[in-house]
Image (cartoon, grey):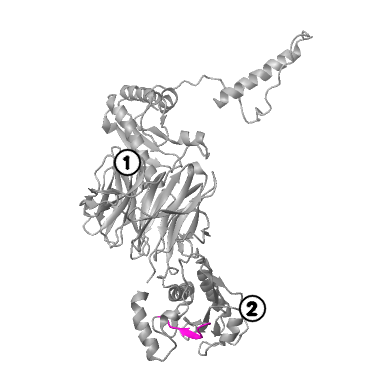
Amino acid sequence: MLKRLMPLLAVILMAFGLAGPASAQLQVRVDEGNFKPTPIAIPDFQVTGTNTQLARQIADVVRADLASTGLFDMQNPASFIQRDLSINAEPRFADWKIIRTDALVVGAFEELPDGKLAVSFRLWDVYGGELMRINGEPGRRLTTTPENWRRIAHKIADSIYTRLTGEDPYFDTRIVYIAETGPKTERVKRLAIMDSDGANQQYLTSGRSTVLTPRFSPSAQEITYMSFEGGRPRVYLFNIETGRQELLGNFPGMTFAPRFATDGQSVLLSQAQRGNTDIYIMNLRTRESRRLTDHPAIDTSPSMSPDGQSIVFNSDRGGTPQLYIMNTDGSPRACPSGGRDTACRITFGRGRYSTPVWSPRGDLIAFTKQEAGKFYIGVIGVDGKGERLLSESYLDEGPDWSPNGRVIVFFRENRPGAGPQLWSVDLSGRNERRVMTQTDASDPAWSPVLQ
Amino acid sequence: MHILLKASAAAALLAATAACASRPPPVEEKPVTPPPVEETVTETETVVTEPVVESTITPGSLEDFRVNVGERVYFDLDQYRLDSDDQEILKRQAAWLNAYPNVRVLVAGNADERGTREYNLALGERRASAAKDYLVSLGVSASRIDTVSYGKERPIAAGSNEESWAMNRNSWTQIVSGATS
């Protein structure tokens, strides 16, 4: 998206006689080897109206979002020299160079006559001494109702992040997960949802039935998950807006490991019957299902490529759980390890591999690896090359990608007997951090960017 | 079980009292061990007056199956093969089920916590099916046996150690209906 806009952006910049080509501007590099966070200053916003506290809270969320990436060095407000910033005036760059900040965000908060609030902001390249346009505009102004203020903050943080890194946004998103309470032998598991930064936690199910493995639809309006409602594992749909839950399909045996297909029109899932687990795809409109694997081994945890053409899944057909890729239409494909097969194995390292999840960018697959008493979250190329382990603990399990494919969220039991918690880690392996939840938590899944 | 323990403690107490009353005790006799302190008899409990009946297990009952047959068979790491101990228990289960043809059962497969969730659901289903298949091979009608997998979601041992994991890798034959009450 941004890349496509770049030439246009350059044209606009030159048309307005603004300094230099866009490529010379401040750029935060996310994959650099000897990494150093970029200094950024985000002073509290100018306030029109009385709600100074809310204005500060919005700025706090913007700062927290950007700091959570590990890519920025958030400058301490106490060090700021210029105290008379205005959204309509150029900052005194010299004042900001003294404190060695690269980027400066200037924001303004307004209470509107209709009770809504508006936040405007501009992003400045301090050393370049120029405005950084956002989608060709000199700045952005966002309006919403007061109770929706966090989303404005996330959208501002997304704009700044995207403009500075060239990566797609991911702050204005939600995470669905399983909230766990009670002793291990009588665990209560509820479907729960929260904003990507852990705010606004809500429980979606009562805990009467154990629920597992929720995953978002591409519209972020529906969740597919597994529930023991009625005594056996079966796949359900949950509509976030209406709260309606619906059993998916009428399969014999049990169904589990659901995940939406890329286009959101179907759900991939596993069905187990008479000791054998295979993968199916069910069309949500026609309710017709098609069998994708037919093998006496366990085939489970399917995840579709962003282009919809391929499916990565977990199978123990080779003796231990490993990752395999197949064509969605079931036709044979050229395997990276040679030959043609309907399912190509892509993991050959030591240990057991499971829970594959295709990156939204299409080039990588995240997985859980188990070896010698430890669990790891890792990524591997679609061709089975370039395996990298990003995290390690007593139990690290169940990765899912941020919608921009930059961050992985997973759950961890730090030591034997510890309850699970949510963690995230950057694709580079840096910036491992806890995602706070009110209770023990597992099975996180990231929503697409909200509309 | 619990009542029996308390009754025997009370009997020991009575014996001790009787021993004290008789005079004088032979010197070589060892002091009577006092009853364990944790066996306190509260005032509301009528342990002594209640007739102590050896609890008889009704044949064909849930308890009969649980105590005299055995509900669970245990699996090796990552395995769903039934070893000779497992087969022995399942043979007893089959004989019992053949003797009480109205009983229906649910065989639930379980896995330990050292695997990932979805794979373990599939593994548990394999274990439950292995147990069911064995029961069917011994003449129990397949229509009387449902299977389910709880994966790693319902451990019976809460520990995070080899011993607990071994306990949690099992298939559990539960009576659903038809047992003698």
Kind of element beneath mark 2: helix
The earlier-in-sequence mark between 2 and 1 is: 2
* Kind of residue indicated by mark 2: Ser
Quarter of the image with the C terminus of chain B is top left
* Kind of residue indicated by mark 1: Gly
Dot 1 alpha-carbon crowd within 10 angstroms: few under 14, some 14 to 19, many 20 or more:
few
Residue A415 x, y percent position in the rendering = 55, 46
B44 with respect to A232 (left or right): right
Dot 2 alpha-carbon crowd within 10 angstroms: few under 14, some 14 to 19, many 20 or more:
few
A88 with respect to B5 (left or right): left
| Number of the label disc, if any, that sits on residue A318 | 1
Main SS class of the magenta portion in the image: loop
Read off the magenta span: A126-134
Which of the two residues, A281 or A103, is positioned nearer the viewer here?
A103
Which of the two residues, B126 or A32, is positioned nearer the viewer here?
A32
- Host chain of mark 1: A
The residue wearing badge 2 is A79
Which residue: 30% across, 37% down? A275
Kind of element beneath mark 1: loop
A234 with respect to B29 (left or right): left
